[in-house]
Amino acid sequence: MGQSLSVEINDSNNLSLCKLDIKPWLFSKRRGFRTIQAGSGSGSGSGSGSGSGSILIDIYWDLTYAKFGSSPEPTTGFYFAIAINREHILVLGDMEKEVHKKIR
């Protein structure tokens, strides 16, 4: 877990909407969830990402039962997912049912 993860989200014109550098400390817990608001909208309150140009980026992970091989990446028993405005855009791992339950 000494690595970091970089994610860049671009629009259809290939203009960067946001870039996230996710550091290893985010994964200090073996299971978790993090929401990041990006974009120009200021969206107040608990927000559903409805502000003009506002994007809600949800990051979910569970490494509780992860099994590792000879590399630092888990091989089974994990998930890592990113959703934008509650729509899945990336799901990694072999626990897809669990991550779908989390996002709903």
Image (cartoon, rainbow, N blue to C red):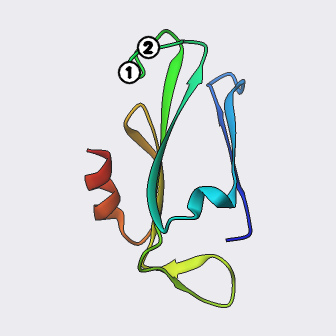
x then y, percent, for residue 82: 49, 47
Q: Are marks 1 and 2 in contact (CB under 8 Å)?
A: yes
- Please state, as top left, top right, bottom left or bottom right, where the N terminus lies in the image: bottom right
* Label at residue 47: 1
Q: Quadrant of residue 97?
A: bottom left
x then y, percent, for residue 58: 46, 41
* Nearer to me, 24 or 77: 24
Q: Secondary structure at mark 2?
A: loop
x then y, percent, for residue 10: 66, 31
In the displayed orientation, state which residue is furthest to the bottom: 70
Mark 1 burial class by Cα count in 10 Å: few <14, some 14-19, many 20+: few
Identify the residue shown where x is 41% and y is 80%: 65
x then y, percent, for residue 39: 60, 20
* Label at residue 99: none
* Label at residue 44: 2
- Amino acid type, label 2: Ser
* Nearer to me, 101 or 92: 101
Q: Is residue 19 above or below residue 52?
A: below
Q: Secondary structure at mark 1?
A: loop
